Amino acid sequence: CLEGTLTLCRAGHLLQTTHGQPMFTLALLADDIPIAPEDFRDDHRDQLKRQIQLRYVDRIIPNVGLCIEFYNFVSIKDATIYPGDGKHSCGEAFVKVEFQLIVFQPLIDEWLVGLVMKSTQKGLQISLGFFEDVEIPSANLRTPYMYDSAQERWVWLYRDEETNESVNYFYDKDRLIRFRVTAVHFAEARQNRRAMSIVGAVDRDGLGLLEWWP
């Protein structure tokens, strides 16, 4: 989880999900980025980009989201070189940079597709591939439902109102599932919890395993 004295604001949307809502956003940040003396002869933009990638990519910024990739520079100001002591600093140049990152933080009620990783009595654990802290509580499953403890999986007990026919739809492991986002939580730095987690639901038509819907 990233913290510090950086300046941040949200920018425009970049990509969209199949449901027509943004899945990723561009976040505008400002930070002091160091360049080591041995790198002074190299292209400073390449060095700045590398340092930004190392500092931010695959990290979570509280109340913003998961940093996916560097996008572009907005502004690069003059560098300030501080004298080094040979121990804690070595005469790095610190450059004030404004830049944009591709950030993942889904919107409430946005529809996403993931993979069923595990079923427990509490609900489903879902993976998006690049992000795995997604849970669908049992209360957010399609009703009526039950938990098959022998097979350790949830089942939607569907009944056709016209034919009165009953069909059991199982939330099988390793199957693609479409869900809607109901909450995005960020943990405080002092709390021993996941830095970011998503809560989902499959309580509407079109939600659930992809194979259920034509």
Image (tube, rainbow, N blue to C red):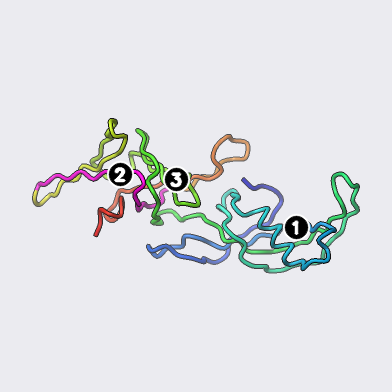
Residue 141 among those drawn in magenta: no
Label 2 secondary element: loop
For the magenta stretch, what is the residue range? 164-183
Nearest to viewer (mark 1 / mark 2)? 2
Label 2: how many residues lie within 10 Å, few (<14), some (14-19) or many (20+)?
A: many
Q: Which mark is residue 134?
A: 3
Instruction: Identify whether 45 is placed above or below 174.
Output: below
| SS for callout 3 | strand
Residue, disc 2? 171
Q: Residues within 10 Å of mark 1 (few under 14, many from 20)?
A: some
Q: Residue at x 52, y 66 (%)?
A: 14
Side (left or right) of 43 relative to 142:
right
Amino acid carrying mark 2 in the image: Tyr
Instruction: Name which quarter of the figure residue 78 lies in.
Output: bottom right
Q: CA distance from mark 2 to mark 3?
A: 15 Å
Please give the residue where the numbered disc 1 appears in the rendered image: 33
Q: Of the residues shown, which amino acid type is indicated by label 1?
A: Ile
User: Which residue does the image show at 46% across and 46% down from the upper left?
Assistant: 198
Q: Of 172 and 84, which appears nearest the observer?
A: 172
Which badge, 3 or 1, comes first in the chain's sequence?
1
The location of residue 89, given as percent across then percent down, is 85, 49
Taking the image as shown, residue 37 lies to the left or right of residue 143, namely: right
- On screen, residue 32 versus residue 109, left or right, reads right
Image coordinates for residue 140, horizontal then vertical, percent:
34, 43
Sequence-wise, the earlier of marks 1 and 2 is 1
Assign the magenta stretch its main secondary structure: strand
Rendered location of residue 146, percent (x, y): 26, 36
